[in-house]
Image (cartoon, grey):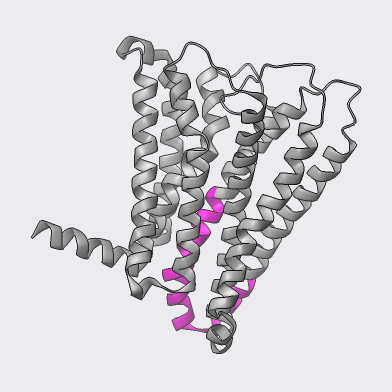
Amino acid sequence: MRWWLLTTAVALTMAGLLIFASLYKAFAFYFYPNVYFILFIVLYCVMLFFNISLVLLIVLDESLHEPMYIFLSSLCINALYGTTGFYPKFLSDLLSSSHRISYEGCLLQAFVMYSFSFCDLSILTVMAFDRYLAICRPLHYYSFMTKRRLSQLVCFSWLTPFCLFSINVLLTARLKLCGINIQRALCLNWLIFKLACPEADTFPNNISAYVIIAICYFHYVFIIWTYIYLIKTCVRSREDRVMFMQTCVAHLTSVIINVTVMAVDVMYLRFGSRDLPQSLQNFITLEFLIIPPVMNPLVYGFKLSKIRNRILSLIYLKGK
């Protein structure tokens, strides 16, 4: 029942944001000329508040110094990294009549956007591995998940995207461009790549893209594999089912959000129609910078009992 309510809440939130984005442009002008700026700066502040609060809660509370919560703090730090790579520039553009960015700045933003998205997937993958060990191999969990191994997994989840997209962006930087206009609210590597001159050698870029896609698929397949074993194990034990509901439902919700957002974004980027309303196009382009950074801390904050109880205790003490 709780799982159904949580899924329904996520679905309704995403649907509400989508409807709001598609209707907003029709009315924004009549309310206030800078209403977009107000909307997005409030949204950005909410993201900062949720993610920084969760990171500080985990860092300051010693009872939360466990692998699962360390990975969660890494997920929140990644949300801060990705949103900070976009929103300050975007907010300044909303107040400016000239929406320009240097070529170097565009490449840097493309690197941040892609590494942020891939980091999300990498962190969710190591979190799935952590849950697999905790539930399916409980006797080996603490002997395997040492501080050193934990550090290695965190480094893997960050360094893999950084290395992959450093190469990817460097390959794009060598291309000669025959265009300067990007019809999106942010710079993405694929959009820069499409501006390359017809005679440009794009073969290394295509190989790099296929390698990255293959690694992404491997991450998703690994997550599915871990959940197959998790479900098999939980069917046999009531205690494991309780642990699954307490710790895996939030992770599975984040994975579903990640898959949905990235699938919509990739499909629109490759095959999207220009006939859609501009506000809807902008929302689809920015959804990976809106939905996961807001939903992940909320989902984990409400679902993980330790974090929820700690938050409630802080609110209760403050109320006194």
Vertical placement of residue 184 versus 111, above or below? above
Q: Where's residue 47, x and y in %?
A: 39, 43
Vertical placement of residue 127 versus 178, above or below? below
Q: Where's residue 264, x and y in %?
A: 62, 38
Q: Which residues are magenta?
A: 228-257
Residue 230 in magenta stretch: yes
Quadrant occupied by the C terminus: bottom left
Q: Where's residue 104, x and y in %?
A: 66, 29
Image label count: 0
Q: Is residue 4 left or right of residue 268?
A: left
Quadrant occupied by the N terminus: bottom left
Judging depth in this view, the residue of 175 and 312 nearest the camera is: 175
Q: Is residue 115 visible?
A: yes
Dominant SS in magenta: helix
Vertical placement of residue 200 versus 223, above or below? above
Judging depth in this view, the residue of 159 and 304 nearest the camera is: 159
**Among the 4 quarters of the image, the one containing residue 124:** bottom right
The structure residue drawn at horizontal position 15% and vertical position 61%, both measured from the top left corner, is: 316
